[in-house]
Image (cartoon, coloured by chain):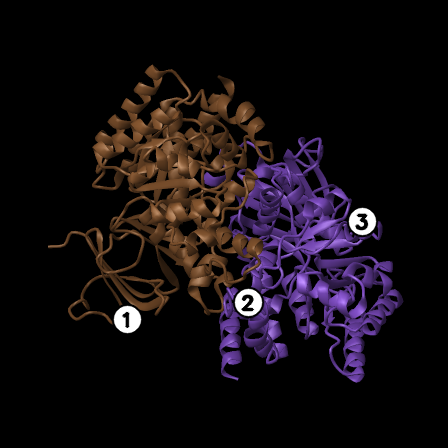
Chain colours: A purple, B brown
Amino acid sequence: MTTNKWLIKNGAFAVNREEKAVVHGYMIIEDSRITYIGEELPAGEEATEAVDGTGLLFLPGLINTHGHAAMSLLRGYGDDMVLQEWLQTKMWPMEAKFTASDVYWGTSLSVLEMLKGGTTAFLDMYDHMDEVAKVVEQSGIRASLMRGAIGLCSEEEQRAKLAEAVAFAKNWHGQAGGRITAMMSPHAPYTCPPAFIEQFVQAAHDLDLPLHTHMSETAAEVEQNVREYGLRPVAHLDKLGFFSRPSLVAHAVHLNDEEIALLAERKVAVSHNPGSNLKLASGVARVTELLKAGVTVSLGTDSPASNNNLDMFEEMRLAALIHKGVTGDPTAVPAGEALRMATEYGAKSIALKEVGSLSAGSKADFIALNIDQPHFLPKTDLVSHAVYSASAKDVLHVWVDGRQVVRNGECLTMDEERIKHEAQAAFTGLLSR
Amino acid sequence: MTTNKWLIKNGAFAVNREEKAVVHGYMIIEDSRITYIGEELPAGEEATEAVDGTGLLFLPGLINTHGHAAMSLLRGYGDDMVLQEWLQTKMWPMEAKFTASDVYWGTSLSVLEMLKGGTTAFLDMYDHMDEVAKVVEQSGIRASLMRGAIGLCSEEEQRAKLAEAVAFAKNWHGQAGGRITAMMSPHAPYTCPPAFIEQFVQAAHDLDLPLHTHMSETAAEVEQNVREYGLRPVAHLDKLGFFSRPSLVAHAVHLNDEEIALLAERKVAVSHNPGSNLKLASGVARVTELLKAGVTVSLGTDSPASNNNLDMFEEMRLAALIHKGVTGDPTAVPAGEALRMATEYGAKSIALKEVGSLSAGSKADFIALNIDQPHFLPKTDLVSHAVYSASAKDVLHVWVDGRQVVRNGECLTMDEERIKHEAQAAFTGLLSR
């Protein structure tokens, strides 16, 4: 007997396939999986209790492939500043004061915002990761988690950080009913000595886990890499064996043609963070060329301190808009491709095989948008509407792993009032310490 | 005796001044004007019935300075296409079929979306403008309206269009309790012969009205202007006397240094349409240089067929983000300046002297955002939150000219269900004709 079964009728389902973008009809979920999507109600299902999907557009849950959720505590604490001044006078002094409790409440605030906005899986690279894992376990969201390690410290401290990253991965990979997976993550080539990166690569081999890092976010760090190691970051990481594992690099703004070709050859995925890259004035990644070369490009918000929200609809729209404007090609990153970047390619980027699309057999991570609103009319192209007109606030319902976690805009698994109170208190505490 | 009085207490009011961004306290509205904003409740006001502003951020109503509202009927009907193919196979054939009724319902759909999203005034350049004026009159929004005239036709047709534009301005300027103002608007230098533009300039002088036109949206139209008239568009319009009137040009994407200097000298305002310019791959306007030169730069959505929504928060955020990313300067277009572009500079662009800021004496066009939500925490910089984190859907209440037109997200002046139904029916009708 099935303990968890949903029949959704009269819905519009964004299957986002070339031959058909949207199926109007029925979707069935049993336990944690989608078992059927189609125009007809399968025989024998007439008696199943149904959810009315009228006026709703169902999408795969959105997947945020790069971020530091706890930094929501610093949202709006420093904006419109030169990068080094922002880091040195605003971010780093505050982050140095973050306790486990701060990470717990900051992450809670972010996960609440993400779930309510239709994000069903996210990648998080930070410190105090046990706290992040606890929030994931409690909230019902899916996540790829990792201790991000900066190696500009003594060898002893390096060893401790690596051991922490390994212990975290061993403890949490596969936990929360499989909703938590782990990656290994040296912070960036410019913050990690080569030997330290190689230790992470070895650990990833030993644990059979993928790798993640920041790469080529700014022109300055590319120049520094050439100055210090005689190589640009892609060749440098390749030399260190980084790409011998399934790997995902965040940002990848400053790439030359050879680097794009090598990323494609090594099957390295890229997390494109358009909002953060624009806000920090890092530049505009060569996304159309990356996609053309066959690189898997997904979308990330980066931290809420450099974005400043976790609205993945906005990242989809930015990805669909800015590459048109910058390349002069209005066909660049069409709506369907932007949606795939936020879903299917997102899943691939963080090595999740069973999510990222609405299809029978997939894990039931999906969301429902309220399209009975002026900005979704007329009913022309619903995928276009989802990308060019929707926002996080249009999300009405969210399911992860077959479990409804948001209903009518309210999160069922988290205590919103408490989280808002504790997050504000945590920020006040950071200011006063 | 005052017939209309509002006292708002415990609110946060974005006065957006350099010395102070936000005032926490009280705002009083009497009839159509703000009469007080301050931290203290003025003596004698204790007995006035009050609106509780707790958890709300009050902003001046947003002002959308370029658009074609009725084109909401073509939202999502053609996306991700090359400009000429989009115009020739999608937009123009459908627009040729637009009736007065289509314009009425398309405009109603857009005005409904704008009001609910916090836009209290908009510019509209289209055809069947009596219908647009009716929607403005009925809905309670404020608008600057004009018959946009394309001059690629016989002299007889040109005369008829000019006469229509003049008659519309005479009939409607100052109507709807002063909420409607008019401008004169030849469509663009590349669609209007010089003599036709001069006739509009003369009419604007005769009627004492400002001028509006599209200018330098694409590189191709600039080249065409040079080919046909030996001048780039700014010098061409200047030669035709266009800038002898208060004037607003939309887009202004492709400008050289001399043109920026001339626009500043002639006090020409620019309506920057970042979403549309990106989506149509027109390019990125030189907004930081325009602002630096002292040009009044405001924000517009352009039509919902090339945006595809009317969310002015998104235009603010795009303006604040893309110029950082493209110029490499993270201090470009800071949050406060983006908010001024959408409010104060918007009012100036469409020649409205009494709106665009929260200040005693101003017309009471203002909105309230629900900031008791995860994406507005912690309470660091509320202007930053409004620009970098908010969306149209965060707007809870809207007042125009002292009258509340949106309450708890519902429009009080328009029949939402009827408009949604009629707009969808209008689109279906266009498809079938």
Q: Residue at x 58, y 62 (%)?
A: A280
- Give me the C-alpha separation between circle 1 and circle 3: 60 Å
Report x, y in % for residue B119: 37, 47
- Give me the C-alpha separation between circle 1 and circle 2: 33 Å
Q: Residues within 10 Å of mark 1 (few under 14, many from 20)?
A: some
Local secondary structure at mark 2: loop
Q: Residue at x 62, y 40 (%)?
A: A335
* Cβ atoms at labels 2 and 3 below 8 Å apart: no
Q: Name the residue nearer the viewer: A43 or A339.
A: A339
Chain of the residue displaying label 1? B
* Cβ atoms at labels 1 and 3 below 8 Å apart: no
Report x, y in % for residue A318: 58, 49
- Residue at image mark 2: A82
Q: Is residue A413 toward the left or the right of residue B427 in the image?
A: right
Q: What kind of residue is marked 2?
A: Val
Chain of the residue displaying label 3? A
Does B14 sit above or below residue A432? above
Q: What kind of residue is marked 3?
A: Ala
Label of residue B39 in the image: 1
Q: What kind of residue is marked 1?
A: Glu
Label of residue A261 in the image: 3
Instruction: For marks 1 and 3, give the one nearer the viewer.
Output: 3
